[in-house]
Image (cartoon, rainbow, N blue to C red):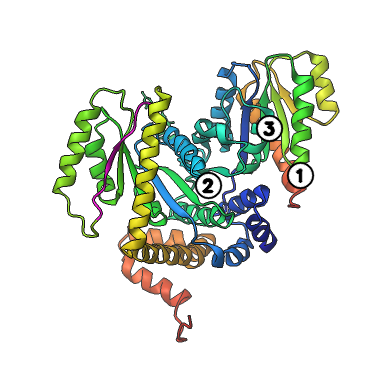
């Protein structure tokens, strides 16, 4: 597995994609590869792009790839789509919009399904970013649908977060609800050909005027022209990538980058502990039938969840050794 | 933990603009088989399809052909995959083609199975499941 890590670092596409797959699948031995590549990560500029379903995120990502290629930057993309909760399958449709870059060796696009619950997605995305990072991609774009908590968690992995809004979808309310307003570094008003684009721009602006921006960066609003007008579309996306770069420079200069790295490191610790400790405990409890027993007892009020947690901790976790980091 | 869905790339190449069937199959594989399905969209070159298959690390590539070019496209696709060390990626086909061509493609081992119009998604799912089980028992050399 370490071998896969080495080959991915040398730019081997097959090794990189297999490594991401093994991470998603929780293949035994994958940790070895992550351990191997981790010291070399942290070089890429990670951009998160989120917004409601069908907002035009993939179409935008495609043009952003082109824009960064014009600036001589290499690009990695992770496009996340939901897994069907009923069948465990997924239709990963983002790639269709990015196919024109398929043969450009400076571009690597990987689709990812959300799969199970329990923060596993965020971990898989984080690991995937590490792989694209050590492949040497300068810019990594992560596309997610901005609807649930999981998606907001992914934000922890990004330096610059773009929230895509579209006229006529009630986005303003939706974005507020999902807590997206707070996390955005840049707003995009997409599909300028749609009625209501100007109004949405105004509404977003007035919403921003009510906000407090402690770190000094006031999120700009970028209007992106319709994809049906290729030239002005490309131009406005050029404006967007300039703004993104400006934000990254700001992060570096103002030392906010350190704060974000701190947040990211914290999230990574949570995720790896959850995977290494909580998940095996739950698996074990489920396998030996104790989980079901606990559920029964809680339903009958013979036990409360807090005492139960103490019992579980006693069984699995109590140790008197100090942690040596 | 431990769910490992198979990944499938469905592709169309050239000027062939029939995508109703392949989109139905994509949906079916998600819903009947719990697979992760990536569709390339129409008008892709074989080189683009190979690149997508590698970047997505799929187990199976399904190519739909409605233009009568199957005897040229499948061998070429296999050749391109093999040249990239992707001998393990399985090819399946779909579309209208003469029985003689199907038999020849299958017997030469280039294509694992070819599904004509009217194949039920359930049948396709069943065959893929078998193909994959066979593959998993012989896994995993990369
Ligand atoms: N009118 C109009 N339609 C657009 C524009 N940009 C994208 N679309 C269309 O919007 C639809 C969705 O585009 P995508 O790029 O797939 O949107 P997405 O946000 O990635 O969608 P999901 O990943 O499914 O959530 C497609 O039919 C696009 O052609 C635009 O500027 N104007
Ligand atoms: Mg998309």
Check chain identity for marks 1 and 2: say if they share one: no
Examine the rendered structure and indicate whether residue B59 appears above or below residue A293.
above
Is ligand 2 closer than 8 angstroms to the Cβ of mark 2? Answer: no
> Total marks drawn?
3
Residue A57 appearing in the image: yes
Q: Callout 2 environment at 10 Å: few (<14), some (14 to 19), or many (20+)? A: many
**For the residues bearing labels 3 and 2, Cβ distance under 8 angstroms:** no
The quarter of the rendered structure image containing the N terminus of chain A is bottom right
Q: Nearer the viewer, residue A123 or A279?
A: A123
| Identity of the residue drawn at 39% across and 59% down | A295
Whole-percent x, y for residue A185 in the image: 30, 49
Secondary structure found at label 2: strand
Examine the rendered structure and indicate whether residue B16 appears above or below residue A306.
above
Secondary structure found at label 3: helix
Q: Quadrant of residue B79?
A: top right
Indicate the chain on which mark 2 is placed: A
**For the residues bearing labels 1 and 3, Cβ distance under 8 angstroms:** no
Residue A152 appearing in the image: no
Check chain identity for marks 1 and 3: say if they share one: yes
Numbered circle sitting on residue B47: 3
**For the residues bearing labels 1 and 2, Cβ distance under 8 angstroms:** no
Q: Quadrant of residue A171?
A: top left
| Identity of the residue drawn at 30% across and 32% down | A166
Residue for badge 1: B85
Q: Callout 3 environment at 10 Å: few (<14), some (14 to 19), or many (20+)? A: some
Residue for badge 2: A76
Indicate the chain on which mark 1 is placed: B
Reading the chain from its start, which is encountered first: label 1 or label 3? Answer: 3
Q: What distance separates the C-alpha of mark 1 from that of mark 3? A: 14 Å
Secondary structure found at label 1: loop
Span highlighted in magenta in the image: A217-226
Whole-percent x, y for residue A243 in the image: 34, 45
């Amino acid at each position: 597995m370490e071998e896969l890590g080495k080959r991915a670092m040398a730019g081997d596409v097959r090794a990189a994609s297999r490594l991401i797959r093994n991470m998603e699948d929780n293949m035994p031995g994958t940790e070895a590869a992550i351990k191997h590549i981790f010291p070399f990560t942290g070089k890429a500029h990670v951009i998160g792009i989120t917004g409601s379903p069908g907002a035009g995120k993939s179409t935008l990502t495609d043009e952003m790839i082109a824009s960064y290629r014009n600036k001589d930057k290499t690009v990695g993309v992770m496009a996340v789509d939901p897994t069907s909760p009923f069948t465990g399958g997924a239709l990963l449709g983002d790639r269709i919009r990015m196919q024109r870059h398929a043969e450009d060796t400076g571009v690597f696009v990987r689709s990812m399904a959300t799969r199970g619950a329990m923060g596993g997605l965020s971990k898989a995305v984080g690991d995937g970013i590490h792989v694209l990072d050590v492949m040497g991609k300068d810019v990594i774009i992560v596309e997610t649908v901005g609807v649930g908590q999981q998606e907001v968690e992914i934000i922890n992995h990004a330096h610059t977060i773009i929230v895509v809004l579209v006229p006529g979808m009630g986005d303003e309310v939706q974005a507020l609800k999902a807590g997206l307003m707070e996390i955005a570094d840049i707003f995009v008003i997409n599909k300028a050909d749609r009625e209501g684009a100007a109004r949405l721009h105004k509404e977003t602006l007035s919403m921003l005027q009510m906000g407090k921006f402690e770190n000094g960066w006031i999120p700009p609003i970028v209007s992106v022209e319709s994809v049906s007008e290729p030239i002005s579309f490309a131009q406005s996306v050029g404006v967007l990538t300039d703004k993104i770069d400006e934000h990254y420079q700001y992060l570096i200069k103002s030392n906010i980058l350190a704060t974000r790295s701190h947040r990211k490191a914290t999230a990574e610790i949570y995720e790896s502990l959850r995977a290494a400790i909580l998940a095996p405990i739950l698996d074990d409890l489920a396998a030996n039938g104790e989980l079901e027993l606990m559920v029964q007892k809680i339903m009958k009020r013979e036990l409360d969840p807090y005492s139960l947690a103490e019992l579980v901790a006693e069984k699995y976790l109590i140790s008197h050794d100090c942690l040596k980091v | 933990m431990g769910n490992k869905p198979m990944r499938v790339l469905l592709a169309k190449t050239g000027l062939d603009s029939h995508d109703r069937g392949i989109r139905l199959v994509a949906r079916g594989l998600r819903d009947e088989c719990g697979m992760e399905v990536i569709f390339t969209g129409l008008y892709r070159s074989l080189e683009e399809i190979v690149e997508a298959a590698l970047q997505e690390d799929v187990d199976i590539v399904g190519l739909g052909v409605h233009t009568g070019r199957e005897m040229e496209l499948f061998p070429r696709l296999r050749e391109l995959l093999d040249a990239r060390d992707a001998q393990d990626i399985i090819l399946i086909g779909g579309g209208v083609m003469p029985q003689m061509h199907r038999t020849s493609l299958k017997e030469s081992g280039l294509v694992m199975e070819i599904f004509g119009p009217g194949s039920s998604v359930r049948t396709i799912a069943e065959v893929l499941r078998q193909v994959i089980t066979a593959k998993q028992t012989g896994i995993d050399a990369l």
